[in-house]
Amino acid sequence: MSSVEPLYGRQAVREALRARRRQHKRLCMATGQHESAILHEITILAQQQGIPMESTDRRTLDKRLNTTSHQGVLLETTAYPYVSLETCLEQAEQRNEPPLLLILDHLQDPQNIGSLLRTAEAIGIHGVLIPHGVLRVSPPPLSMPVVVPASTSVLPWLPILPSISYCCNNTSSR
């Protein structure tokens, strides 16, 4: 069985549901929230995708996530889907552009990662190499739930490569 990781925050959850790149296991929403367009959209997307939904009180979410910054929304989802270097190179070729990759390493602040990812998405980068532990390791500050909100939710749309060795071992010669 694949591992499940928490993703929280309204924008992050909505973009993950829109992108449909991961398998979503369950959506938990805090009771007593004011109606909003984004909450309505999250609910509709979850229903369309057949994701089980659960209502819970805010304190339960606080305890489960060990934070109060969840905005009343938690999506239990599978790990982030990495792509191959070959996929990134093919994307560049299809666009008739020279390959452009962003390689991140030794970053300490998720806000820095967020800024870099927003910029990468804005310029049409073909891939972002983020070493394995940066996005998947707990505890924060460099766990996926922290990085996603900091990246204004562009992360679900970016092609992410997990490591240099992964790229070298999973690429044909070009």
Image (cartoon, rainbow, N blue to C red):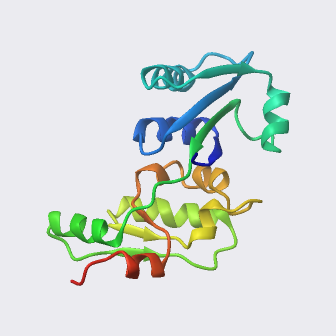
Residue 104 location (% of width, % of height): 53, 76
Specify whether 156 is left or right of 52.
left
Query: Image quarter for residue 173?
Result: bottom left
Residue lying at 37% horizontally and 67% vertically, measured from the top left: 127
Specify whether 86 is left or right of 33.
left
Which residue extends farthest front? 1
Q: Looking at the picture, does residue 77 appear above or below residue 96?
A: above
Query: Image quarter for residue 52?
Result: top right
Residue lying at 47% horizontally and 44% vertically, measured from the top left: 22
* Rendered-image quadrant of the C terminus: bottom left
* Rendered-image quadrant of the N terminus: top right
Residue lying at 67% horizontally and 58% vertically, measured from the top left: 143
Q: Looking at the picture, does residue 85 appear above or below residue 28?
A: below
Q: Looking at the picture, does residue 158 appear above or below residue 169?
A: above
Residue lying at 73% horizontally and 62% vertically, measured from the top left: 141
Q: Looking at the picture, does residue 111 appear above or below residue 97?
A: above
Residue 101 location (% of width, % of height): 37, 74
Residue 39 location (% of width, % of height): 57, 23
137 or 29, which lies in front? 137
Specify whether 113 is left or right of 48.
right
